[in-house]
Amino acid sequence: MRARDLLLVIVTIGGMGAGLLAPGPALAFKDLTPYLLMGLLFLSFLRLDFAALLKPAPGGLAEVAIWSLVKLLVLPACLWGLAKWLWPEWALAVLVLSAVSTGVTCPFYASLLGADLPRVLLMVVATSLALPLSLPALIKLLVGAETAVPYADMFRLLAMIIFAPAALMGLVRRFWPQLVDFLGRVSFPLSTALLFTISAVVFAPFGEHFARDPGRFLAATLLSFGLCGLYLAVGRLLPRLAPSILSPLTGMTALVYINNVLGVVFASRFLDFNSVLLCGCYLFPIYLALLPLRWLTRHLADAGSGSGSLG
């Protein structure tokens, strides 16, 4: 475990606690959530080779396509069926959380873990663009609920969050390269501050509900940890079926670091409170997952040095 990993976990969980216990200051930033995510993504682009993104390595597009299909359709449908059987009242919430896109914060964690950043970013773009179609279709097919999802609004929001930081980073690298060096030196404290603020903003609206029904929060928290473990397991084990195409580190980061904040916004507008709560409580395992992922990264690297591949 690296000291930075532990610090990141402590600070972000502290942000969740701050949002619950002192929601007033956090709610002042509520409308700034997309811009906070943009700032975090901008900092993650510091390590990204944009040329590699435009010219993915052989097999890169195939891997992105497979992981995207698993992320948006196969995994959420399977987990919805499992939840429908074991815990029906949470089935819709499980579907929503599992079917949201790879998160805009995923490149930040991918850079920390040493994952293939261009492939992870392609996962973010591909799943985000498909989400406004895939998520309502799944809900209608499996649950039978109609959702009036404003596709154009969601597309504009996602495009702004993903592409604006990328364009800005390209301009900074072209016209102000010394700023890139400076940001590289301060990126970790800035990113940590952004994650603290995002965590507080997401949890701020839950304060009064937590006081009224703590049992539901406990159920959502335990379920979120269970789902995170399943995402991690799928990302680790599925590449064994196609080791020449799929990377476990790409799969684990893309499946674990999902856009649960967007899930909170979507569920609060169209669905039930359980869906809102589960997407919000996923902030607990999404940060703690950095610790086992760091261990698995070292394990995969050791296996690769011994066998010549990371399968």
Image (cartoon, rainbow, N blue to C red):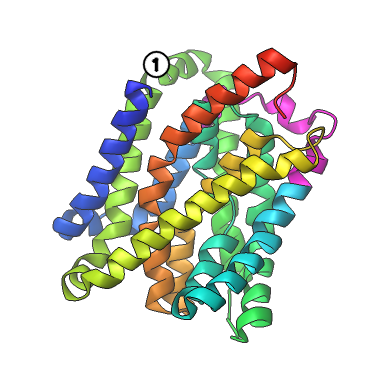
Closer to the camera in the image, 52 or 59: 59
Q: Secondary structure at mark 1?
A: helix
Q: Is residue 270 left or right of residue 156?
A: left
Residue in view at x 33 percent, y 33 percent: 8
Q: Quadrant of the N terminus?
A: top left
Closer to the camera in the image, 5 or 125: 5
Main secondary structure along the magenta-highlighted residues: helix
- Residue 27 seen anywhere in this rendered image of the structure: yes
* Spot occupied by residue 67 in the image (x, y as percentages of width and height): 71, 48
Q: Is residue 247 left or right of residue 59?
A: left
Q: Is residue 267 magenta?
A: no
Residue in view at x 83 percent, y 34 percent: 59
* Residue at the outermost right position: 58
Q: Which residue is mark 1?
A: 185
Q: How crowded is the residue under tag 1: few (<14 C-alpha within 10 Å), some, or many (20+)?
A: few
* Spot occupied by residue 109 in the image (x, y as percentages of width and height): 49, 34
Q: Is residue 147 above or below residue 182?
A: below
Q: Is residue 212 above or below residue 42?
A: below
Closer to the camera in the image, 121 or 297: 297
Q: Which residues are magenta?
A: 44-65
Location of residue 172 by image quarter: top right
- Type of amino acid at the residue the image marks with label 1: Arg
Location of residue 155 by image quarter: bottom right
- Residue 103 seen anywhere in this rendered image of the structure: no
* Spot occupied by residue 7 in the image (x, y as percentages of width and height): 29, 30
